[in-house]
Image (tube, rainbow, N blue to C red):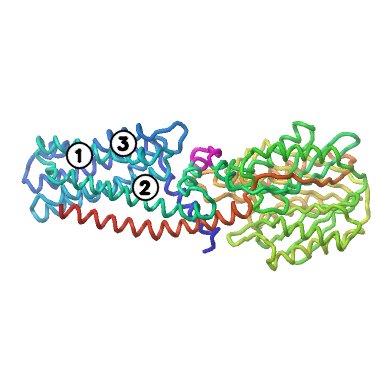
Amino acid sequence: MGEKAKVKEIARLYSKVWQLPSFRGIVLRLGLSVIAVSTVLSLLKTISLLGWNALTAFVEYALLFGVPTSVGVGLLYLIIREPGAPLDLRRTVGSVLFAVIFWFVMAVLGGVVDTLVGIAYFEARFILLGMGMAYFALSFLITGLSERHPLRNFLGSLMPPLTLLVSWIPLTWQGAFVPQLPQSGLAMMTIMVIVDALAVNYIFSAVSRPFERDLGISGPGLLRAFGHAYLVDNPIPFERMMTRIAVEQDVPIEVLVVRSGDEIVAVAVTLYVHPGPFRDIGSSALPSVIINHIEEKYGAIGLVFHGTCTHHQNLTSKDDFPRVLAEIDRLIANAETHSEVGGPVWSDEGKFKVWTIFSGDDVLAITTSYPHFTDDISLEVGKQAAALVRQRVPSIRGVCIVDAHNCIGEDAVSVMPGDPDAEEYVASVASAVFGAVNAPRRPVEVGVYRLTDHGLTITDGIGPGGIAAFIIKSAGNESVVVVVDGNNAEPGYRDRVVGLLKGQGFANVEMVTTDTHIVNAVSLSHKGYPPVGRERPDDVLDAIGIAVTKARESIRPASIGLEFGEVRGVKTFGERGFDTLTLDVAEAASIAKRTGLGLAGGTALLLILLSLLL
């Protein structure tokens, strides 16, 4: 399994751990668990004591197990709570529910052994042993998510064991059924807590080493920052941490401006800032921010194309958004439009297919690998393709390359420099432009419409930018590019879109996505993200049909122009923030699996020995 696949597996595991029921559901499960273990132990005790009062036995056990899981949990939360933190009351009680499973199982096991053997020895010690195991699990979960000082987390996690001892002592004196607290019980519990705390601290220290070594950041700190972003939709801690390891990059940006007379009708931005990494973190929402900016400032339809870029070009925070928007404004102001346009021309170059549209001395190339799976095309590969175009076709000044990003599968990978696919991609773009450069330039009409009132949400794979249609009519032929604010498309879905629109008389059809990662990891119950067309495919297709119909109604004579720029010095993930981080996460996961499981097993064995020997 590759490093990126390992990271995805870790994210899925994280989702499963914190995919909890409602607070009411957790409390109900915890209460029923206390009732169940109390019932079993009281029945065992009455059986062994031949007819003693089962109700009294149940009440005593309910107090023994109920006080730590109510008062103990309440004290725990009072100590570690922090407004707006991921570790809210629901997740705190959920952590306790998971941890006390060990306690309840060991308690019942001890009761069964005592009943079978006919002595009163194992039950009391196994109750302590189970609480020791529960403390280990609880301390691990609390440390992984709480922003509080480690000593405060230690003290908070200590509340369930402490309230167990406090409630057990009077039951030892006054109760008739609950086993007596062993004379060494306090010493046993103290040693267990210390051993557990040391083991948990060692695990987190070991997991943190790769991040400290390579990036100078805390592994547990990164985990907690991720918790803020993933569990409570607060991206700020994660963005701050990523900004600490950011690199500054100069990232290209290009605009296609459509005018009708003096009016700006539409602006399509080819974005080489990658709209990731997920949810509202970094530049994930940048496509919809750009779309809204264009429509609010210019009264024109805003579109965003996905340029050749990877997660290396993720912005670490939204602080650089104003610089991106300012460069877009500058390019719009400087763009020269042309009333005669060449294309679009379709070129099938093998794995990669290319649409070319010529305006003045510039060319727009829209590329797709459909039906082959492809993730991103790296920025460097895109630059190599543009350079080869200018080398082979000296009359071309500017080369704008769009990655349609419209076919994804589990085995899809990004095209990086040096890959065989990279060489083919570069050659395909250059060959397509070379073959189409002499296409006749003709007057064009353009129709554009963006649909937002479609009833689709990010859980359906559709971002706030909605679904847009961009129609070019030339020499009586209509071509349409459907732009969906989503992250790639379900295999085969492009064919459905093409089939629908060619059936409506369009000569050329392409579907592109913005690659917005605002649709990624939208909920703990959702696996990864839904590519366009996976969820509610018929509804998405209906929305596309509406957008295209509306765009057709708005067709008018127009001029088109491209303008090329660069956003300088923006803070991005870079290779250090993405590749190194990905490798470190995979390494930390291996350390956690190896060290954590080994240490947890060793700690459990030591606790068993302590419970039997002291």
**Percent coordinates x, y for residue 467 in the rendering:** 70, 42
Three-letter code, disc 2: Phe
User: Label 1 to label 3, Cα distance in Å?
Assistant: 14 Å
Which of the 4 image quadrants contains residue 498?
bottom right
The amino acid type, in three-letter code, at marker 1 is Leu
Q: Does the magenta stretch include residue 41?
A: no
Earlier sequence position, callout 2 versus callout 3: 3
Q: What stretch is highlighted in magenta?
A: 228-237
Cα separation between marks 2 and 1: 21 Å
Give me the disc on residue 73. 3
Give percent across and percent down for residue 565.
80, 46
Would you name the residue on which mark 1 appears? 165
Residue to which mark 2 is pinned: 140
Q: How crowded is mark 3: few (under 14 residues within 10 Å), some or many (20 or more)?
A: many
Horizontal relation, residue 291 to residue 614: left or right:
right
Marks 2 and 3 sit apart, C-alpha to C-alpha, by 15 Å
Q: Does the magenta stretch include residue 235?
A: yes
Pinpoint residue 15: horizontal percent, then vertical percent: 47, 48
